[in-house]
Amino acid sequence: MKHLLTLIALFCWMTTVRAQNEKPFVIPELKEWKGGKGTFTLDSQTRIVYENEQLADMARALAADCQALLGLHPEVTNAKAKDGDIRLSLRKDAQMPHEGYRMAIGKQVIVSAPEAVGVYWGTRSLLQMAEQSDQRALPCGSIKDFPDYAVRGFMIDCGRKFIPLEFLQDYVKIMSYYKMNTFQIHLNDNAFPRFYQWDWNKTYSAFRLESDTYPGLTAQDGWYSKQEFIDLQILAENHFVDIIPEIDAPAHSLAFTHYLPEIGSQKYGMDHLDLFNPKTYTFMEGLFKEYLEGEQPVFRGKRVHIGTDEYSNKEQEVVEKFRYFTDHFIRYVEGFGKQACVWGALTHAKGETPVKSENVVMSAWYNGYADPKEMIRQGYDLISVPDGWLYIVPAAGYYYDYLNTQKLYEQWTPAHIGKEVFEEKHPSILGGMFAVWNDHAGNGISTKDIHDRTYPAIQTLAVKMWTGAAPTVPYTAFNDQRRRLSEAPGVNQAGRLSGSFSQQEVRPGETLPLREVGYGYTVSFDLDGEREVPGTELFRSPSAVFYLSDPIKGMMGYARDGYLFTFPYSVKKEKVQVKVEGDNRSTRLFINDRLVEEKVIRKQFISPKDSMKLVPTLVFPLEKAGQFKSRITNLNIRQ
């Protein structure tokens, strides 16, 4: 009898354990979860209740996110909460670290934190849980979640390739959805002279921000007005993302010497500023001042990155001057109330000239340039950006084209800087960041290609920058489950479709319900052709145009990011079936199921010794039909 009672008790205990909800999948993984029983379902009666006036705008933003992501239109109120509501609350919590939050899911969902940022991160977890359920159901239970690292970032090179403002805006939202909080925007840089006959005057360079101090400095092939950049930062602030603007000098500075050649170095190359010329300092001070001065400066955030990497160290006199330049501009931006950020270079530029370290943030990217142990000893706070782990250089053949997300997920944390491994949550390591460098200017890479590389990296590194602990979800399961999440509410840079799409006929000038379709697509239609004038569009979106007759040769083709690609086929007065297929490596045109051409990534030779890959990919545009004379029927789209 005693044995039977023991078995019954064990069975009851196992039944109770099994009834407890398992930890839900979100990115980054929840720190602490205590499972309950049952679910909370968001429905048409769900309200969003804010208990503190400081959270009113956040509540309204959450309602908009619910509409974009879940198709719900919740009422926003500060009335007393009832069952079925979501409550947002600021509450004192001495045990909660900065950015942390609690969530209790039962008859209500209560998201609470000592600070608004914590409540906001809690709403991101809530949305991720809801969007994975067809019934918009959340598992009942309680959550305590907080980051181990304060800086969880991404840096994008806008200097060598112009990145449209809309892309940056979407990336603020994507990063925010995955609790990434630091977005570094590299505003100037230049290509390599070997691709331009070793002629500095011909070598591509760009500075992307509007300048009144130096009219003509701003790149004309893509730039941001001051107001656009201010508005981008305001958007980021509303999503609890810090933007770090970077003006890179005294290397990577060809845009400045193209504008004012006399400040360029004849000895080390015109991408180096002449550190012995007083006009160099006057120029750079004027540039920083334009964006830092006044009560409402263009650079709104607490940090500004001043560059300072990869300058020549062949002569000690130059090294000392480089160190002087670095110290000078650290103190200069501090004079405007900003915290200075620099690239790690002071092991490469070892010398006697003192460089300020107190309250200075260093991007630790390569230990040969800045030994992280020594930099910590000198007093720098580090952001872990190890190039051998975290550098993407699209289609260049070095570093990574796509990051090794499995290796990162299983092995890396911000405590790993190159081969040095520090204790987790080391007080001098603020966090981590990964980077996209568009070194090969002119290689055809599109912003969609950049997104194809960075989005999986963001999802993976969001996990590893939030916590130094090993994930409990195996990589294969993580990699499968991450694909089920949206990029962010209202964001679909990848052009993902849910199901297929078809339309009996497309009429000239018509607006379609789809903006675009991303890699892995097939677009087919019947074409009752008429001769079209050059420049006749079939479809366009903000990112691309597909031509029935391209503007140059009158061939079928497409344009995006300033590149035009054409197929050896022109529309005639005939009836044909057209099919276009595209992925992240190639774009293919078929006429009557016969392959006309497959455009693949290929080498283009700049000189007998130098080549660069050309990337001909296309995320197919669909938003707006052109003014064509031909008849388009039986449009079918699948992915």
Image (cartoon, grey):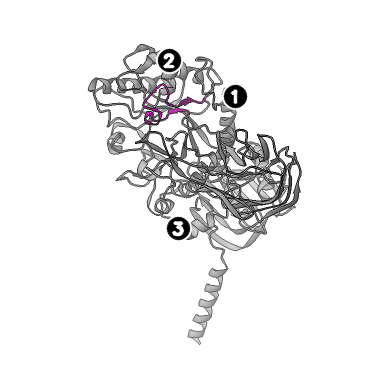
Mark 1 belongs to which amino acid? Gln
Ranked by sequence position, the earlier of labels 3 and 2 is: 2
Q: What residue appears at the point 55 percent right and 69 percent down from the top-left corner?
A: 18
Q: State the CA–CA distance, disc 1 to disc 3.
A: 42 Å
**CB contact under 8 Å: marks 3 and 2:** no
Which residue appears farthest toward the front when viewing the image? 573
The relative height of residue 274 versus residue 428 in the rendered view (above or below) is above
Check disc 3 and report its element: helix, strand or loop: helix
Mark 3 belongs to which amino acid? Tyr
Q: Position of residue 15 (x, y in %)?
A: 56, 73
Q: Is residue 424 visible?
A: yes
The relative height of residue 210 versus residue 119 in the rendered view (above or below) is above
Q: Position of residue 107 (x, y in %)?
A: 66, 57
Q: What residue appears at the point 59 percent right and 24 percent down from the top-left corner?
A: 227
Mark 2 belongs to which amino acid? Leu
Tell me: 578 left or right of 351: right
Q: Quadrant of the C terminus?
A: bottom right
Q: State the CA–CA distance, disc 1 to disc 2.
A: 25 Å
Q: Position of residue 203 (x, y in %)?
A: 42, 26
Q: Nearer the viewer, residue 202 or 172?
A: 202
Q: State the CA–CA distance, disc 3 to disc 2.
A: 51 Å
**Mark number, residue 227:** 1
Q: What residue appears at the point 71 percent right and 44 percent down from the top-left corner?
A: 573
Which residue is the site of mark 3?
475
